[in-house]
Image: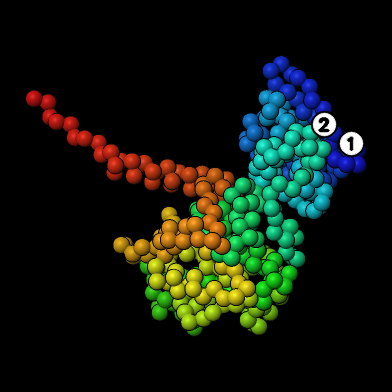
């Protein structure tokens, strides 16, 4: 297998199986293993195997199924760094694990073995970042909906890539000439502070609310291109209140943090859609900052528009968090606690009667 990728040897060790891989390029192998072999350790935890890396050689031990999956994951990661030449993140490793798992359910084993990096998950490509591949089935479904629907709702917890992938998709459509501009918006919902008391003009007042969108833009575009786009109006970033009365044509329009819109704001925003435009609406229904008793426009819209032709919806869960392992565990803990509270509300513990 020299020149094409890692060579693997399988042998039985008691009830376990050993997979031995030798990579052709020591430098690329070090990128696969990660700094201080952190990627190897991550795969050990995720797949319940033990792995020992030495130079360009790797030995994986575990159950037959786990060892074989780990072997395919390492082969996939090696093919990826061989194509890009760049270091991997733990998110890339998680993506390879998810993609390998999905691949095994879609293709016969012979086909999977013949092509270690068969593209299973969809991807977004921009000039600055190149190809960005989905890291899990939810992101894959999201990207597919972005390509095929005129309006897409994406709900779920922080760290699942809802906004980041939406901005990447918008940038790719702009670069390919499918749209003429990008319009990015957020509701400026105050959290204990009044906008009027913040220093500066209107743009300086609302910029803190829009900072996550700026960060995503700079991830997918060169800084000079972002700055030029903002100056010429090709890229427009504005609070939701500025959308009223407009018809947005030949544009990608993104509304982020949509859980903090009111019913009237959401209806106003959705009816701004013009000819040859796409809309993406993202939000986390578990983080609504509206005053008590006021219904979220996002929650209402996804219910009213369910089943309408041309509209797509994807729901991310805590297991789809790709930002950091700890973020995933935090989201899971909060969801478990909220579920426990709901259960206790439905089934209150009865008081004990005093003993006679």
Residue at horizontal 82%, vertical 27%? 9
Residue at horizontal 71%, vertical 29%? 67
- Image quadrant assignment for residue 213: bottom right
C-beta proximity under 8 Å, tags 2 and 1: yes
Is residue 210 depicted above or below 7 in this figure?
below
User: What's the image's color scheme?
Assistant: rainbow
Name the quadrant of the C terminus: top left
- Image quadrant assignment for residue 341: top left
Residue at horizontal 51%, vertical 75%? 272
Residue 314 percent across, percent down from the top left = 54, 54
Residue 25 percent across, percent down from the top left = 87, 43
Query: Dot 1 surroundings within 10 Å: few (below 14), some, or many (20 or more)?
Result: few
Label at residue 8: 2
Q: Earlier in the sequence, mark 2 or mark 1?
A: 1
Residue 41 percent across, percent down from the top left = 67, 37
Using the rendered image of the protein, determine whether residue 206 is visible from the camera's viewpoint: no
Is residue 227 depicted above or below 22 in this figure?
below
Element type at mark 2: strand
Q: In this view, does 291 lie to the left or right of 273?
A: left
Name the quadrant of the N terminus: top right
Query: Of 292 and 305, which appears nearest the observer?
Result: 305
Q: Name the residue under label 1.
A: 1
Label at residue 281: none
Direction front: furthest residue:
309
Query: Dot 2 surroundings within 10 Å: few (below 14), some, or many (20 or more)?
Result: some
C-alpha span from label 2 to label 1 = 9 Å
Element type at mark 1: loop
């Amino acid at each position: 297998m020299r020149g094409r990728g890692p060579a693997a040897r399988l042998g039985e060790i008691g009830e376990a199986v050993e997979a031995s891989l030798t990579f052709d390029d020591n430098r690329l192998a070090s990128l696969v293993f990660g700094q201080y072999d952190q990627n190897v350790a991550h795969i050990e935890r995720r797949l319940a195997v033990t792995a020992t890396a030495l130079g360009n050689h790797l030995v994986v031990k575990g159950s037959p199924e786990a060892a074989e999956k780990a072997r395919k994951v390492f082969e996939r990661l090696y093919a990826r760094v061989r194509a890009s030449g760049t270091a991997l993140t733990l998110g890339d490793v998680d993506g390879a694990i998810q993609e390998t798992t999905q691949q095994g359910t879609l293709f016969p084993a012979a086909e999977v073995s013949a092509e270690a990096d068969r593209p299973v998950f969809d991807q977004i490509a921009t000039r600055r970042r190149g190809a960005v591949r989905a890291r899990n089935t939810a992101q894959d479904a999201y990207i597919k909906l972005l390509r095929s629907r005129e309006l897409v709702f994406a709900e779920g917890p922080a760290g699942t890539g809802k906004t980041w992938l939406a901005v990447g998709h918008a940038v790719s459509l702009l670069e390919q000439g499918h749209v003429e501009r990008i319009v990015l918006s957020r509701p400026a919902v105050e959290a204990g502070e009044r906008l009027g008391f913040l220093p500066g003009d209107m743009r300086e007042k609302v910029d803190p609310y829009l900072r996550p969108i700026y960060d995503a833009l700079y991830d997918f575009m060169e800084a000079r291109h972002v700055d030029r786009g903002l100056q010429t109006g090709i890229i427009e970033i504005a609070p939701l209140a500025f959308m009223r009365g407009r018809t947005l044509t030949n544009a990608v329009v993104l509304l982020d943090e949509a859980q903090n819109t009111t019913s009237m704001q959401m209806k106003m925003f959705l009816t701004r859609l013009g000819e040859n435009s796409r809309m993406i609406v993202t939000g986390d229904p578990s983080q609504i900052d509206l005053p008590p008793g006021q219904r979220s426009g996002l929650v209402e819209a996804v219910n009213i528009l369910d089943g309408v032709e041309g509209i797509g919806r994807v729901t991310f869960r805590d297991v789809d968090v790709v930002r950091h392992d700890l973020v995933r565990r935090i989201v899971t803990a909060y969801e478990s606690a909220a579920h426990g509270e709901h259960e206790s509300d439905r089934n209150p513990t009865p008081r004990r009667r005093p003993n006679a």
